[in-house]
Amino acid sequence: MTERAALAGLVERLAGVRVLCLGDLMLDRFVYGTVDRISPEAPIPVLRIGREAAMLGGAGNVVRNVVALGGRASFASVVGDDAAGREVTGLIATIDAVEPYLVVARGRETTIKTRYIAGGQQLLRADRENLAPLAPSVTADLRRVAVSEIGEAAATVLSDYGKGVLTDEVIAEVIGACRDAGRPVVVDPKGADFTRYAGASAITPNVRELAEASRTTIAGDAEVAAAAARIMAECGIAAVLVTRGAEGMTLVEDGVAPPLHLPAEAREVFDVSGAGDTVAATLATALGAGLALADAARLANAAAGIVVGKVGTAVASAGELFGALHAQELLLGERKVAGMLEGIGRVEEWRGRGLGVGFTNGVFDLLHPGHISLLSQAKAACDRLVVGLNSDASVSRIKGPGRPVQTEAARAAVLSSLSAVDLVVIFAEDTPVRLIEALRPDVLVKGADYAVSEVVGADIVEGYGGKVLLADLLAGHSTTATIERLSK
């Protein structure tokens, strides 16, 4: 078994691991559009806005990554009593595997980072934030909640964005409690004083942060390792995992030599937003699962390679991580079978690159030439085609006993092997309405045996300006007829 195949076998151990996430929560907004001209008022591009999206940022993105890996999260943070605070609270409420403990700071502004994007590239980032110290009562509530959760969590992440949540007192108390409980604590650090994180199991600075904190110049592997060793000695930190962009990562661990240098995993970099969150989340979840630090670092490196190939504050799912490790020939991040949440993220990523998304759905029990024709026509109408696949339970309700002939896993595997299909999303309802509402495809495709008015979701798609395409059918092909012939 290869090293990567062995690592892939460790991914399933991340499932169900409970991680306490503590840090600065923020709202990440993304404004997507096109640039066709330069402003006559100043030498700046004019962005014609097409759509907007919002998601959890900062420590909230750490939480998203923990859940995407199959873990569960306890989340302690602070929000303002404003519209953005209510919005991030609502976003957290949609994630089943998160138990939030959010302290509301009266009169405080929730941090918002707004990124303006065209052609898959950021044009501008605008930040709105309040860096004033938190009220002592707010900090006290946060410390109490965090310490009470440490015993229930297998690992803890401190996500420090320097917005005021992680004071020196909070950091010291949480790290001390983790050490007393025998739980690993991972810190995504901020600032030039890493003595604040004394006692941490591992910190995950980037090269610039490491150079500032160690007061050294870094130019290569040896300098990275030396600076990390200096931080460990001066700050009482057990390990340093340095993220180095195109140079990959370097792990320096107390009592372990030589340093572990990991090459970068990404084949194509679109956006590094939130990659540090992915590294901290993966490292902590893996340590919480009992993995060795070196293996946890390798998983974090592979996960980072996935998210930088996406646009926006992205996550790496357990399935994507397994696929990236188990099959090097697969394009990182392009595993074809997904659940709804992962599917939404993949569609957002494609749209961020300016790609048109099509959607069709069905049972696809025994794939025949009629199916192939429909899928080919659907793919011709878009850049990326999503197929909604009825689950086994919904097929039984619709088609009756004895159906499906093939399990949903088998049907998904066959569909995902087709070049025309870019993503398969399995849905449990009898109709794909909820999936269509979530994905908002640009083109909805169904066979010409339907009228547009009969196509499920047509009114939704046409309502926001999308199109409905009726594909020509090949006569004489039917799954039901095939099954009847086989039974004679």
Image (cartoon, grey):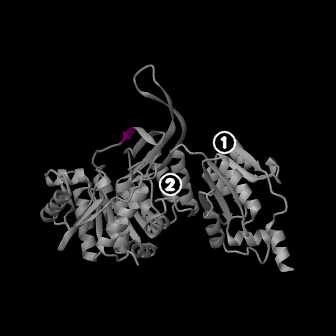
Q: Which structural element holds mark 1?
A: loop
* Residue type marked 2: Leu
Q: List the single residue furthest toward the top.
A: 40
* Prevailing secondary structure class for the magenta stretch in the rendered image: strand
From where the camera sits, is residue 153 visible?
no
Question: Residue 359 at x, y = what percent?
Answer: 66, 53
Q: Indicate left or right for 378 with 183 as reference.
A: right
Please name which of the two marks, 2 or 1, marks the residue nearer to the observer.
Answer: 1
Question: Residue 254 at x, y = what percent?
Answer: 18, 71
Q: Indicate left or right for 228 with 1 as reference.
A: left
- 56 or 87, which lies in front? 56
Question: Residue 293 at x, y = what percent?
Answer: 29, 72
Q: Which structural element holds mark 2?
A: helix
* Residue type marked 1: Tyr
Q: Are marks 2 and 1 in contact (CB under 8 Å)?
A: no
Q: Indicate left or right for 140 with 222 as reference.
A: right
Span shown in magenta: 124-128
Q: Indicate left or right for 199 with 322 as reference.
A: left
Residue 43 is inside the magenta segment: no
| Circle 1 residue | 464
Q: CA distance from mark 2 to mark 1?
A: 23 Å
Q: Earlier in the sequence, mark 2 or mark 1?
A: 2
Residue depicted at 15% across the width and 60% down the height: 226
| Circle 2 residue | 91
